[in-house]
């Protein structure tokens, strides 16, 4: 079955740039989506169609794609960005989430 | 305001059946896919399946095919996730979300989640 691979954890200091990657063989041909989930809350989409940002999501969140890897970049990380982040995409067999990345703001 | 409102927490015994619900409002219900996502305690998100209320087209993750049933009643703008025989391993939080206009896509509006606890 299709898999999306994310690093389990990323740590950055406030004000720095955090980059979270997601790798999958079908990513060159399928859109990726990124979700933020804080403890005890439902996920929230922060990036859709690889690089589009929904209204209400701060400009410091951006997405990019290169080959089989998509990247969520958070510029000028703030304490409130500490959360779990999940990528989502699909292949011919269906849709999957990545395993999730815990972003820690030091 | 677009909302997805889920039914309340459930506590069940192994072998029992269960149907949880997700009511969509504030948008054209029949034109958006609705997806279901499982999150086991302390674990990540798992995509279970989606349904298109317009024609009830339903697609399941191979991991959940045959284990659950997704359905919809468009007359009351509500989607359902059901089990015929629960197992302890079904204990989890279950989320529904609006999941794409006409074709499957971004899960842009999420319900608050329904906690399902299965214990003897």
Image (cartoon, helix red, strand yellow):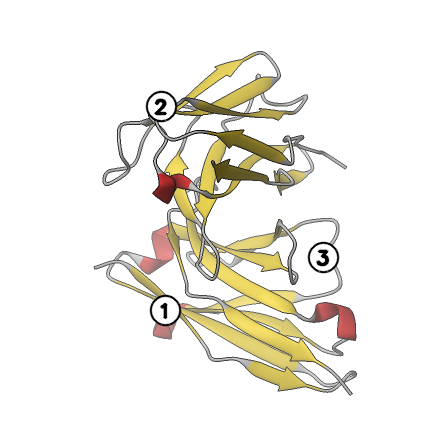
Where residue A36 appears, as percent x and y from the top left, is 44, 43
Q: Which quarter of the rendered picture does the C terminus of chain B lie within? A: bottom right
Q: Label 3 to label 2, Cα distance in Å?
A: 37 Å
Q: Secondary structure at mark 1?
A: loop
Extreme residue in the left direction: B1
Position of residue A45 relative to residue A52, above or below, is below
Query: Is residue B100 shown to the viewer in this render?
Result: no
Residue assigned mark 2:
A75
Residue at 44 percent across and 59 percent down: it is A41
Residue at 55 percent across and 37 percent down: it is A88
Q: Which numbered disc, 2 or 1, marks the residue closer to the eye? A: 2
Position of residue A96 relative to residue A41, above or below, is above
Subunit of label 1: B
User: Callout 2: few (<14), some (14-19), or many (20+) C-alpha neighbours within 10 Å?
Assistant: some
Residue assigned mark 1:
B77
Q: Which numbered disc, 3 or 2, marks the residue closer to the eye? A: 2
Query: Is residue B50 shown to the viewer in this render?
Result: yes
């Amino acid at each position: 079955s299709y898999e999306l691979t994310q690093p389990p954890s990323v740590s950055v200091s406030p004000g720095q740039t955090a980059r979270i990657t997601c790798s999958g063989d079908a990513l060159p041909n399928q859109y990726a989506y990124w979700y933020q989930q804080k403890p005890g809350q439902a996920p929230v989409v922060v990036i859709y169609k690889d690089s589009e940002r929904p209204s209400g999501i701060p400009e410091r969140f951006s997405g990019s794609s290169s080959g089989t890897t998509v990247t969520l970049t958070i510029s000028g990380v703030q304490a409130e960005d500490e959360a779990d982040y999940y990528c989502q995409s699909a292949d011919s067999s269906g849709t999957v989430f990545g395993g999730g990345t815990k972003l820690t703001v030091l | 305001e677009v909302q997805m409102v889920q039914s309340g927490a459930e506590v069940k015994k192994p072998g029992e059946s269960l149907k949880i619900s997700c009511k969509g409002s504030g948008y054209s219900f029949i034109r958006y896919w609705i997806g279901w996502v499982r999150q086991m305690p302390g674990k990540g998100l798992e995509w279970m399946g989606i349904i298109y209320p317009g024609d009830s087209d339903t697609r399941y993750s191979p991991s959940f095919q045959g284990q659950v049933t997704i359905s919809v009643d468009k007359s009351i703008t509500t989607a359902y996730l059901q089990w015929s025989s629960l197992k302890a391993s079904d204990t989890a939080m279950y989320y529904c979300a609006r999941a794409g206009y006409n074709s499957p896509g971004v899960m842009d509006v999420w319900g608050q989640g329904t906690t399902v606890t299965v214990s003897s």
